[in-house]
Amino acid sequence: MKRVLTLSSLLLVCAASAAPGAWRGTITMYVQEYTPNWPGVKKESQLKVFQSIADEYQKKYPGMKIRFSTVPVPDNDTNIRVKAAAGELFDIYWAQAASLNSTLPKNVALDLSKAFDQPNPYIPGNKAWKDVMSPSVLAESRAPNGAVYVLSGDEVAYTIFYNKDLFKKAGLTKAPTSFSELVADSKKLKAAGIAPFHAVPAYPWWSTYFLSDLYSRDYAKLAGFDGQPGFSALDEVVAIHKGVLSPKDDRFMSWWPKFKELTDLWPRDYLTLDVGKNYDAFNQDFVGGKSAMAFEGSYSARTLKDLGAKFEVGAFNFPKLTKNESPLATGANVANAFGGTGSFQFAISTPLANKTMREKGKQEAVLDWMRFFGTPRNLQRLTAENGSYAPTWKGTTPKLALDFDSSAIKAQIGRPRRAVNVGNAAPNLGWVDMQRIFGLYLSGNLTLDAAKKQVQTLLDRAAADYARKNRVDLAKYD
């Protein structure tokens, strides 16, 4: 991908009056967990809504065809890279904003911000498409250059699933309500010969809960550096620069020893592994009844069902921290601190990443189709059928179809997310670099003081790189 397109050639033609225009043909899509008619899935489990929406569009505009990809994608970012390099990327595809904003190559997705500023003709009375979207999600999706590459409409809730049968075997009759109880219950499970967790302790997941509690009283200040709702990459970088999200602040790594009390009870061979490459392993261990708990998203409810978990499933939220557990704890309810967009987050490919997008009028037609399915009514239909995600747009209502006591998950839905985290300031910062240091500390291969020094160096470099690449003068925030 050595060719460089001019900015004007990449700008989306957003006039609603163009609609599908004169172009007729096939629009290809990869829609991840909303994929209809998936091969090999039992008839009663097949999703149909997206196909129904496509049928409605095709009836409205004869000659238009919508084709959904049903080929499994093990690694989405790698799939995007490979297809884009060959100029064969899907017309519309599922992607995470964080990847498009940092780790993926430039010019693989069109900037949708101008389209969001304009009316969506398929939403009655709409003056700007963004008016129906979540302002905080929109702000958090924005790239440092101001572009927005994804249409985001749903959220995933995270919880700790647990095997009620194994809990009973260890003499446990209820879920823990504090972090100390979680550690104590894990000790009882291990004493009964049951692994509490089979998991790589993902730093971006667990740290968000702790940091969101410890820094909760400063949230408005920390999330306000960029003048937008939500906690953005710029907010994170400024907080690092000011020494707040940093080992220089006692709150930042004070929770590591407490968390180590928990992971000391986990199988040691998981602690330093790569999260991405070992994701399925601990899922299988939990579903297979080899471990008592799994920290996962609401999407896993469908996995548990499809894989045929043969035990009673329970779920509980991240427990509040008390002063006994940390003198710096604020007592904030951070149950929904870690979460984010789910499977309804779609990008449109560029002419560089997708040769067919060079056809006259196709970009406008693809955008029109996105506008058609991107309405509150259709988002409601899609999320209700899938049952694993909650819609975030105005005029929608969560309808989770979970066949177990999902009160813990449902309690998170609709609550404002006040999350503080570290990982978006630079590519690989959270999932690779911080994860490596975190794993070495938890496994006993690095002291806390040594970890603090390495983390500080890492954060300083990430903030400086962000400021240089995005031409941000951090001194103005001093």
Image (tube, rainbow, N blue to C red):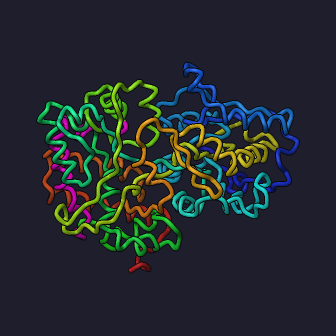
Magenta residues, start to end: 248-276
Q: Position of residue 95 (x, y in %)?
A: 55, 44
Q: How many marks?
A: 0
Magenta stretch: residue 212 in it?
A: no
For the C terminus, the quadrant is bottom left
Q: Position of residue 355 (x, y in %)?
A: 70, 37
In the rendered view, tell whether residue 379 sits above or below residue 42: below
> Residue lying farthest front?
173
For the N terminus, the quadrant is top right
In the rendered view, tell whether residue 190 sits above or below residue 430: above
Depth check: give the residue in front, 65 or 397.
397
Magenta stretch: residue 271 in it?
A: yes
Please report the residue visible at 35 percent of the width from the left and 25 percent of the height from the top: 310
Q: Position of residue 367 (x, y in %)?
A: 73, 47
Please report the residue visible at 38 percent of the width from the left and 63 percent of the height from the top: 420
Q: Position of residue 195 (x, y in %)?
A: 20, 34
Please report the residue visible at 20 percent of the width from the left and 40 percent of the height from the top: 172
Left or right, 375 with reference to 163: right
Please report the residue visible at 55 percent of the width from the left and 36 percent of the height from the top: 33
Depth check: give the residue in front, 89 or 406.
406
